[in-house]
Image (tube, helix red, strand yellow):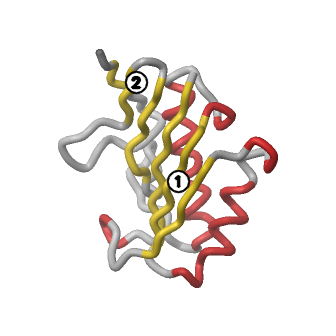
Amino acid sequence: MKTIITTKNAPAPLGPYNQAVLSNGTLYISGQIAIDSHTGSFITDTISNETLQVMKNLEAVLKAAEMTFENVVKSSIFISDMNNFSTINEIYARFFHEETAPARETVEVAKLPKNVNVEISMIAVK
């Protein structure tokens, strides 16, 4: 059994997928990129602002599922340039307590959707 989670406070999917799927108490959040859901604008002026928008989008999806970042057990970060790692990590860290932060990997990729610089997906558990 699965429940589709959607919110207008995060960008609509760009393809045949959902923002998130809840199954047996586990929330699988699709990769989020830096789209402002209210304006439809891509936030790519700085890597800091781009990462912050991605995290806000993830937060909106978590909230729609009645969860917070404390429920996150796994994150996957995809970046187009590993030179941006420290800045992305700094923004990402603001949303977690270090002692309870989730498992994570960060991978540099050749290209991301819409030529953005960062995409993050998460798994959370109720």
Q: Is residue 54 left or right of residue 1?
A: right
Quarter of image, res 13? top left
Residues at marks 2 and 1 touching, judged by CB atoms closer than 8 Å: no
Of residues 38 and 104, the one drawn nearer to the viewer in this rendering: 104
Q: Which mark is residue 54?
A: 1
Reading the image, the residue beneath label 2 is: 22
- Please state which amino acid type lies under the numbered disc 2: Leu
- Please tell me which residue is depicted at 43% across the width and 49% down the height of the picture: 39
Q: Is residue 90 left or right of residue 50?
A: right
Instruction: Work out which quarter of the rendered image holds the C terminus and state it.
Output: top right
Instruction: For mark 2, give the secondary structure.
Output: strand
Of residues 48 and 121, the one drawn nearer to the viewer in this rendering: 121
Number of other residues with Cα within 10 Å of mark 2, as a class: few under 14, some 14 to 19, many 20 or more = some
Residue 98 spot, x, y in % from top left = 79, 50
Residue 2 vertical position relative to residue 60 in the rendered view, above or below: above
Instruction: For mark 1, give the secondary structure.
Output: helix
Residue 53 vertical position relative to residue 8 in the rendered view, above or below: below
Q: How far apart are the alpha carbons under marks 2 and 1?
A: 20 Å
Residue 67 spot, x, y in % from top left = 59, 25
Q: Which mark is residue 125?
A: none
- Please tell me which residue is depicted at 81% across the width and 46% down the height of the picture: 99
